[in-house]
Image (cartoon, rainbow, N blue to C red):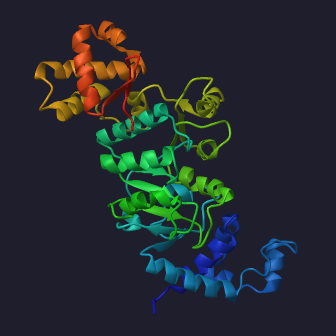
Amino acid sequence: MIDLDEERICMCALNKIFGFKPRIAQTLVRELGSAKAVFELDDKTWTELLGPCSEFLGQVNRHELDWAEKELEMVAREGAVFICFTDQSYPRLLLDCEDAPVGLYYKGCSPPEETFGGMDPVAIVGTRDLSDYGREWCRKMVRAMAAGGKRPTIVSGLALGTDICAHLEALDCGLPTIGVMATGIESIYPCRHQRTAERIVSTPGCALVTDYPGGTAPLPIHFLRRNRIIAGMSKATILVESKIKGGGMMTANLSFSYSRDTFALPGRIDDLRSQGCNALIRQKIAEPITDCDSLMESLGLPGGVSFRDSADQLVARVNASRLPKDQIGKAAQILLEIRRHRGINMDELARACGIPYREVTSICSRLQDDSLISIDLLQRCTIDVK
């Protein structure tokens, strides 16, 4: 039989009972000295504390403790742990938020104190319907964070689009990442992200977290409630793309309400996926992202390499055996120009870079062969983000 701490059982039960109003449970625990003491209150005292019409009257009972004991046994079998808000390992920034959960289910190969004890995390959120523009900039920003001397943890929600793009790029760049789930710790949603979830829990410094008990279904309201944890545990939130209404917008607004740095990627005014970002910038809720260098400076992450340096390195690595050395610098110049002007055609590239047209077409052909760019039938070039 698994030896479970009695106080942790009580905390787990309180987390379930007061899931949507965790402040009540936290206040009671602090006032009474322990979660166990909360369960020792009689009905009269509960009525005096909460009022005769409280929805929580009668809910704090022995039945919930029996449930919590079985719940923590399941958690242990899953290789996870339950962290209480009174534990030293609880995320420090999240604890500063009024609506911080009573506890967090945590699954990872590193102890939670190590995962949460490093640099303050940065959240990257946005639409599930991510455009090539959004995906390119999401990856570009994560790479810029990975290239600096200070390497933050990337926090997101393990969802389609922006979330999974941020998680995968962080893993590929060697940055720690935390996936905040809207289900129980035993259930990955969507199921197509099972492999990514396994990569996260098996990578040092990375983890999956949730405040939802086992068996929680992925309902829309659960995703909205989940967003407060993403914003709350992060020192800054970056909104990549979002419609006027969406989970990413909610997370960015929560970040602002927590007095955290909030950033948004501006986009075309006629693109629905950018209207949310543009609105936050207009309302001065979010600071616009204009380039990676200034973003890193605002995040307090200096020391990264510029895209010029990383482009040189990337082209040299991918094409070392096939592209003549005298063309490596030109290839980097072409990549930079395509980055600045998505859809630029070969004629425009030749003029902008001052490179003969025939040489531009030859270099671009090599870059396309190496999956760095895509060229359409009209010879328009874009960075390949597939």
Q: Is residue 133 above or below residue 255?
A: above
The quadrant holding residue 178 is bottom left
x 60%, y 60%: residue: 100
Residue that extends furthest to the bottom in the rendered view of this protein? 1
Q: Is residue 53 above or below residue 5?
A: above
x 37%, y 55%: residue: 118
Q: Is residue 113 above or below residue 350?
A: below
Residue 158 coordinates in the image, percent (x, y): 49, 54
x 14%, y 32%: residue: 320
Q: Quadrant of the C terminus?
A: top left
Residue 133 coordinates in the image, percent (x, y): 47, 31
x 33%, y 28%: residue: 373
Q: Nearer the viewer, residue 288 or 348?
A: 348
Q: Nearer the viewer, residue 235 or 331?
A: 331
Q: Is residue 34 visible?
A: no
Residue 354 placement, left or right of 49: left
Q: Nearer the viewer, residue 371 or 225?
A: 371
Residue 145 placement, left or right of 283: left
Residue 229 placement, left or right of 31: left
